[in-house]
Amino acid sequence: MLDRLIVEISGKSYSQKQLEVYVLLRTIAMGEGVKRGLPSAETWAEHVENFKNDMIVYTQLENDQQKLDSFVPDFKNVATAEKALVSAQAKDPALDAFIRQRQLTEAEISRILTILFRVEAYTKNRLQLSALKTNEESSFISIDPKTDWFVALSKATSYRYYAHAKDYKTLTPFRS
């Protein structure tokens, strides 16, 4: 299987490849182990749900240019995450194979990290954590799907899963 659709949010479909890359980059940006971010049957359901939640937030930002513009990520964080990815890729053959199979370009990686940090900034803002000064400004938080703001946002956003989206299937991309 080359790719498949996983979830549709407000008319925009997301594929397994997009989900896998997003989750991997988020995991590396968070400073977690690479293995946790690589696709597997054990973590698939959690990754699908977290990705859906993040894309609901991003859809909210995309639909409001003023909000999108106000949550521009600190490009220092994007550059740090890119360096962490390059470093991890040099050390981990499974990660290197994953990146090469998906033929990810620097521009795609930077675009996805920008989305990821925008979602993070919006989430922190909604949770009023942005006013708190933490020792680690790049520390990530997960969206709690039970918070009032997210419940309201989720109810106002149409989404659906494609058939068998919650069943993990390995992608086998073309090799050139």
Image (spheres, rainbow, N blue to C red):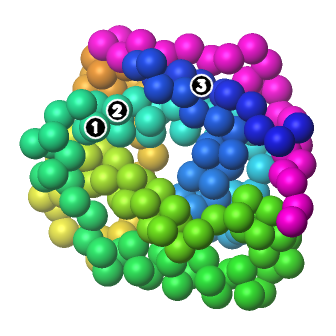
**Position in image of residue 151 (x %, y %):** 34, 19
The amino acid at mark 3 is: Val
- Above or below — where is 12 with respect to 133? above
Taking 75 as reference, is 32 left or right?
right
Magenta span of residues: 155-176
Q: CA distance from mark 2 to mark 3?
A: 13 Å
Of helix, strand and loop, which one carries label 2?
helix
- Asked whether the residues under the numbered discs 1 and 2 touch, taking CB atoms below 8 Å apart as contact, a structural biologist would say yes
Taking 83 as reference, is 41 left or right?
right
- Above or below — where is 155 with respect to 58? above
**Position in image of residue 140 (x %, y %):** 42, 59
Query: Is residue 73 in sight in this rendering?
Result: yes
Q: CA distance from mark 3 to mark 1?
A: 17 Å
Q: Quadrant of the C terminus?
A: bottom right
At a point 43% along the width and 60% down the height, the residue shown is 111
**Position in image of residue 159 (x %, y %):** 48, 16
**Position in image of residue 170 (x %, y %):** 88, 43
At a point 83% along the width and 42% down the height, the residue shown is 2
**Dominant SS in magenta:** loop
Q: Which mark is residue 93?
A: none
Asked if the stretch drawn in magenta spans residue 165, the answer is yes
Tell me the residue that label 3 is attached to: 7
Q: CA distance from mark 1 to mark 2?
A: 5 Å
Compare residues 19 and 146 and report the one nearer the observer.
19
Taking 81 as reference, is 34 left or right?
right
Query: Which class describes the residues within 10 Å of circle 1: few (<14), some (14-19), or many (20+)?
Result: some
Query: Which class describes the residues within 10 Å of circle 2: few (<14), some (14-19), or many (20+)?
Result: some
Tell me the residue that label 1 is attached to: 62
Of helix, strand and loop, which one carries label 1?
helix
Asked if the stretch drawn in magenta spans residue 163, the answer is yes
Of helix, strand and loop, which one carries label 3?
strand
Tell me the residue that label 2 is attached to: 59
